[in-house]
Amino acid sequence: MTNEKSNNEIHNMNFQPENENIVEPKQRIKLIFEPRSVILIGSSKIIEEVGMASPELFQNIAANMKKYFKFDFQVIDIEKMKTVPSADLAIIVLPPKESLVWAELTMEAGVQAIIQITGGFEAKIKEQYLALAMKHHVRVLGPNTIMGIVNPSLGLNTTFEPDLMPKSGNISVISQSGGVGAALLDWATFYRIGIGKFIFMGDKMDIDDINVLDYLAQDPETEVIAIYMEGLRDGRRFVKMAKEISKKKPIVVLKGGVTSESARRALSHTGSIAGSDDIFDAAFKEAGVIRVRDIEELFNAALALCKQPSMAGKRVAVVSNVGGPAILAADALVHEGLELAHLTDHTKNIIKERYPGVDIINPIDMIADARAERFGFILEHVLNDTNVDGVMVINMLKSCFFQPEDAKVLPEVVEKFNKPVVDVPVGAEDFQLVTNLLIDTPIPTYDLPDKAAKALRVLYEYSLVLGS
Amino acid sequence: MTNEKSNNEIHNMNFQPENENIVEPKQRIKLIFEPRSVILIGSSKIIEEVGMASPELFQNIAANMKKYFKFDFQVIDIEKMKTVPSADLAIIVLPPKESLVWAELTMEAGVQAIIQITGGFEAKIKEQYLALAMKHHVRVLGPNTIMGIVNPSLGLNTTFEPDLMPKSGNISVISQSGGVGAALLDWATFYRIGIGKFIFMGDKMDIDDINVLDYLAQDPETEVIAIYMEGLRDGRRFVKMAKEISKKKPIVVLKGGVTSESARRALSHTGSIAGSDDIFDAAFKEAGVIRVRDIEELFNAALALCKQPSMAGKRVAVVSNVGGPAILAADALVHEGLELAHLTDHTKNIIKERYPGVDIINPIDMIADARAERFGFILEHVLNDTNVDGVMVINMLKSCFFQPEDAKVLPEVVEKFNKPVVDVPVGAEDFQLVTNLLIDTPIPTYDLPDKAAKALRVLYEYSLVLGS
């Protein structure tokens, strides 16, 4: 029996909807993400020559779990202990052979789920591991997950990087690559992006992307699913499942291995057969999956989809306190295939009456002395305009009178409408200052008009997914 | 005499190479950027209803000049003083009529150059201002420059934003928009980009883009010229001059008002006739000007051009300590029209002999435990490969053994070759930590492979400019 075959058998057995075993394994998968008791199994002595297992790695994961995890946690050093207690979840950071021995011990002790951090497993050991898991009805993430799982709301953090803990939120991330996953986690933590669950897939011996997608679809905490993918083992099942999920929860995908050159590397990296990029494009389109081009776009899109409603049409108004950046915003919107909304005379007249100095063509330049009151008034009437599907607000501080606190008016106005609004405090320090005020509100912020235009295009694309 | 006409006359008079007056006015333009004595003229009482003049603005500029300027500086409050001393440069922050009066007083006192910060000048006042300037052979930047000039190496900073002072360096920036200029200055300061001269053009009553380009071409401190442009008054002259300069100093342009919608706003904003975007594309190409799409790309390109040699061909090697990001790097390079270099067997054998575990296909995955020694060895042999035109290094910290200090090996190796190398510590905190170590070296850093690939494409484009 090849490893590949046993893999498929497990999947077929557990995840065909008609199978009566479906409920229990699903609950066990849930314990990978939401355990109430965790044991970490490693060695204070073993250092792998090739491979990750080391006392340092073991200690680092232990330190993270002790620091963050809100429930029962116990460390098992195999040099000192020979038995394991029962738990919802075991994290194993040992070389392959030792992992197998201790995986069996944990299964026998009643552990329900395993995150196998370390990798380098030969096919034969994987087969034995998988056979054990099947026998004990234990679900396994990995091997070679490298960083495992992060669930900020429970404080579950099986990574070995100190302080790499994002804040709790509603974007869940699946990474097929340890390195890209680490970069994504770094990005999310640094830019304070709220994370539901963060999953490093590893070698997918047992649990695969489809299982995780299925879990995230049910997870009330997850509102948007962001995926870094190099390939798919079962494209048809992915499309079928994603099609269903994407009507309720947006799915954003960054696909690596797009070119034939990089696909060659992807094959060597994760064994993924990347396949023609056009096929993926077509599959993503059918699945209602929104495709992005890089890590920054992945989070920028997820942020917009998590915070704002979809955009029903292409007509965008720009409400700005500076002229030049408003011009760049108009360029960026048109570049993204969106349109500049033509405001109704009604809207123009209302604004003209109150602010005679403002030149009301879209993009609207409200002039450098605009503060919260003018921003609020004009934004409200622009959002109320039937010709407007969404708004890009530009509020620079430098060279303007706008103060960071003025940004508080934005969520107040925006909550009255069901149209998307994104905010652009153009620049670097300006972006930080305004973002600090808006980060826990439903207004996403971007540092450049181009990124905000892309986010609006994604919100428009998602309205097409919902409408299809 | 229309304002436009008088403008052209001045230009023709001063800047035809055959004109014998050429030396003196050029030296006076130089005093706009490199004065050794400066007076700031404003009012502690006047607040313009429409317009910028205010005691606060006046005080803010005074505070910046006092804080940073390394030579003689004096503040003239017109409410208290009725005469002005002589100086190389006067900065005027008064309403139009008062500005005219005080401009004349300064000219009579022997001031050589004026930065007219405030705007709102009617055509008639501009005519009078210009006539005075011609009579006294004084050069004027503005009116409506808003932020004026920043020259970090002399501490000249005529902006009214506190602490908006970039570090000294070799990238000079020209902005036709106050708002975009403010965002660029914010960006440069925050990301510690070394600035030669920073120029806010304003209304270009006297000094225009061509004059400034001419100055920057001669300025030994300026190595790269970055321009935000909405339109051109004399496209043919720009192309002719840029064509000459770009063979010695790269010129990067971000053009706003690309779409017909935004061009309409640009017309209202700075009075620029934006013209068809295709015409600009053709003109930039002829001029050897490298065009970029947003503010971030402008600085990313300028940084690469300032720090690294041009790239003679399209063949790029990726040297990485992580697999997934290396795949994204390969995707990005091909997306930018570059190619993945095929390493010679000679190079492969040398690397294989020293590091048998490394799988030597490009992108090269050196494995997560690569430190300075392995990075240095492999980078050196890859740079030495005749099939390689440039290298993208990827050195992640998260999930890897690489430490920020290890990055020091990069400039040591890179200086031995005349091929471009860009560095990508993929992520956010990782990017910051490595950038802190490399910021004063010739290695530019980017947070994502996509941005580094764009930078390499720019270095390739510039080799075409040099070769044409």
Image (cartoon, coloured by chain):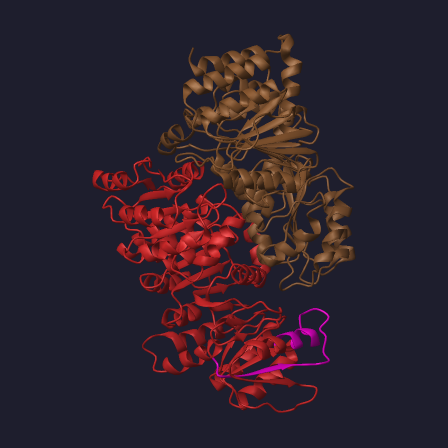
Chain colours: A brown, B red
Q: Nearer the viewer, residue A55 or B89?
A: A55
Quadrant of residue B187 within the rendered picture = bottom right
Q: Is residue A390 magenta?
A: no
**How many numbered markers are drawn?**
0
Q: Estimate the x, y position of residue B38 in percent, counting from the top left.
A: 54, 83
Q: Is residue B53 magenta?
A: yes
Q: Nearer the viewer, residue A234 or A94?
A: A94
Q: Quadrant of the C terminus of chain A?
A: top right
Q: Estimate the x, y position of residue B431 in percent, counting from the top left.
A: 49, 50
| Whether residue B294 is visible | no
Which residue range is magenta in the image?
A: B35-61
Q: Is residue B328 above or below residue A204?
A: below
Q: Estimate the x, y position of residue A417 in percent, counting from the top left.
A: 76, 40
Give me the residue at 59% from left, 13% from top.
A14
Q: Is residue A455 left or right of residue A371?
A: left
Q: Estimate the x, y position of residue A163 in percent, counting from the top left.
A: 59, 46
| Whether residue A206 is visible | yes
